[in-house]
Image: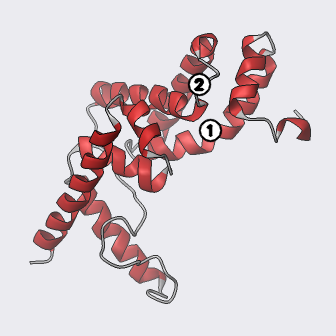
Amino acid sequence: MGQEWQDKKDEEIVKLIQSGRVELFKLLIKRYEGKIGRYARKFLYNRDDINDVLQEIFIKTYINIKSFDTARKFSPWIYRIAHNELVNALKKNKKKLLPLLGLDIFLPYNISREDSFNKENDLRDIKKIINRCLDQLEPKYREPIVLYYVEGQSYKEIADIMQIPVSTVGVRIKRGKQAMKDIYKKLNK
């Protein structure tokens, strides 16, 4: 797969796959393997579990690619498949969710600025605090926060992935951030 495919949109590539160019599916895997893997690591502990789920996600994507409507955006569609597979994996394995979010989700100032915290130890400690807060957060709030702040999905894309109204996404992110602040306060008493 050469450079000529780098500038193509996902939806254009899917159209070609749907018309019989199945070898182009490798491009989608290449584009999404890291993103979906990062997303899966926010919820599963075990590397083997993550790899199994990733494989299942791409198998389901391949099997169902003919049903994808290329007039829509591909990213929320594949994230929805990932969401469903992660939920299934969590139910099957009955594992605890593992949150690993970025730093500036709920604190009142931008802690990701280099001049705020110059030492790696400080950043590591803050990540631990955020992870502990997220660990106590209900999954219905945790997932939209992860999708928005870590994966960079829009509210509309999150709504498509989670199959909830856009307004509910906003409410869940707002409530999740508030719940994290409350948890943070309790941890520091």
Q: How is the image coloured?
A: secondary structure
Q: Give neighbour class at mark 1: few <14, some 14-19, many 20+ (Cα, 10 Å).
A: some
What quarter of the picture does the C terminus occupy? bottom left
| Circle number at residue 128 | none
Q: Are marks 2 and 1 in contact (CB under 8 Å)?
A: yes
Q: Is residue 173 above or below residue 72?
A: below
Mark 2 — residue?
58
**How far across and down, in percent of the image, does residue 68 sit?**
59, 17
Residue 129 is situated, as x and y percent measured from the top left of the image, at 28, 69
Helix, strand, or loop for circle 2?
helix
Amino acid of disc 1: Glu
Picture disc at residue 33: 1
Residue in view at x 20 percent, y 67 percent: 181
174 w.r.t. 112: above or below: above
Q: Is residue 38 left or right of residue 122?
A: right
- Structural distance between the alpha carbons of marks 2 and 1: 9 Å
In the image shown, does 147 or 119 lie closer to the viewer?
147
Which is more toward the observer, 47 or 169?
169
Q: Is residue 7 left or right of residue 44?
A: right
Query: Residue 92: x, y in percent?
Result: 31, 24
- Residue at 45% in and 29% down: 80
x, y percent for residue 95: 28, 37
- Image-based side of 70 in relation to 77, left or right: right
Q: Reading the chain from its start, which is encountered first: label 2 or label 1?
A: 1
Tally the marks. 2
In the displayed structure, would residue 149 be above or below residue 128? above
Of 12 and 104, the residue lying toward us? 12
Name the secondary structure under disc 1: helix
Viewer-proximal residue among 58 and 182: 182
